Image (spheres, rainbow, N blue to C red):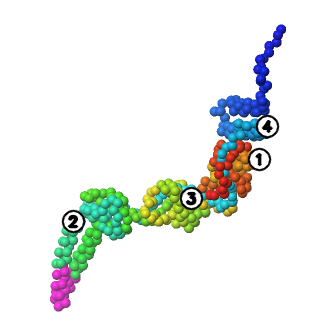
Amino acid sequence: MNSLKTYQHPAYRGPRYPLVHSLVLLFGLAIGLPSCSSQAEEGPDAIRTQISQYQAQINELTMKINELDRQLENMGEQPRSRARLPVTVIEVAPSDFEQYFKASASVEAVQTALISPETNGQIKEILVSKGQRVRSGQVVARLNTQVMQNSMEEVKTSLSLANTVYQRQKGLWEQQIGSEIQYLEARNAVESLETRLKTLESQMDMAVMRAPFSGIVDEIFLKEGELAMPGSRVMHILNLENLYINADVSESHLGSIRPGDKVILRFPAFPDEDLLVPVHRVGQVINPENRTFRLQLLIGNPGERYKPNMMASLGIVTFTSADVLAVPSILIKQDVQGHYLYTADTRNGDLVARKVYVERGPDGEGQTMIASGLNPGDQVIQRGHNLVADGSLVQIENDASPLAR
């Protein structure tokens, strides 16, 4: 019986580089291997562990492929997998480091007032308009005072008569004519009417509303002809020359903040501006509802750019250190073994990405202090840090420059 034979082309002699062929097959199996159990039943830690294992396999295969590529180059062959990934690097250098915590804040005008009358009455005149600038003491509105004016005229007429009677009674009393009681009654009538006139004049003045300080009329709430009473809002006047910045800060930071300490002030409406402002006041009472205390800044407002109730944020220093190594926080990754980043390093004559495990220190303003794992002069991969693996061939496109905060 003739045995079956597998046909093989005479020119075929198997894979030219069996190790490369095997590695490619292994790589494909590692990527395409289905999970033995449903991922929905696995916890996050198990998934991360599996990803880390696959990443380790990829890194190992990448190193072996690079080694085989070098062998091909030595044989005069042009490898296809020796592409160099363009990256940019930053050179790590000692610098000062500050750790901040952030607190939300709001803006308040130092001088702000809701104007209301001191007596009841109908609004007769509103002498200003919205957006108008006013001077301190300027009359801004008046109530209808016709009744009080009539009362004042009546009192003035009575006072004139009382003065005449008093003067005559006084003359008679000086001549020892008439009784003392008549003289005293005439004098008392004059004094009583004078007091009554002063009271009416005060009431007339209470019906006039004046600006308590120089500023801007921001809002008018009532119209002419409407009834106003003490406590009712007629208009809002404010001065924007000076502003308070108020923030509620956790009581855990009470011991680290003192009046005069500098904080970084930012406004979302002006993202390109950073202001360094001293602390004006630290509250002395803890709010029992949210366990915070009031932190207040005082700033000038040239050009009146900042407005009351604007949102702001404070960056408050809690830790400082000199001559330490720090890198942008975004460059640090994490796996089951810890935190790591990539540096550009020379290995076997090639510039490759090297995975370096580091010990993180405090974070601050987008930077992280590195307690250990890096040395001054190390070149940390910045652009392209998400694309490289340990052993990947890289090509630096920028000159290494010291890392500046």
**Alpha carbon of mark 4 to alpha carbon of mark 2: how far?**
112 Å
Inspect the image, locate mark 4, and give the three-letter code of the amino acid beneath it. Answer: Met
Q: Name the residue located 69 percent from the left edge and 60 percent from the top edge.
A: 94
**Alpha carbon of mark 1 to alpha carbon of mark 2: how far?**
101 Å
Which is more N-terminal, label 1 or label 4?
4
- Give the residue number, with chain letter if any, for mark 3: 315
Closer to the camera in the image, 143 or 245:
245
Q: Is residue 86 above or below residue 278?
A: above
* Residue 213, picture quadrant: bottom left
Quadrant (top left, top right, bottom left, bottom right) of the C terminus: bottom right
- Give the residue number, with chain letter if any, for mark 1: 349
Q: Is residue 290 left or right of residue 191?
A: right
Which is more N-terminal, label 3 or label 2?
2
Q: Name the residue located 75 percent from the left edge and 36 percent from the top edge.
A: 77
Q: Is residue 369 visible?
A: no
Q: Position of residue 270 (x, y in %)?
A: 49, 56
Foreground: disc 3 or disc 4:
4
Instruction: Give the structural element (helix, strand or loop) at label 2.
Output: helix
Inspect the image, locate mark 1, and give the three-letter code of the amino acid beneath it. Answer: Gly
- Give the residue number, with chain letter if any, for mark 2: 146
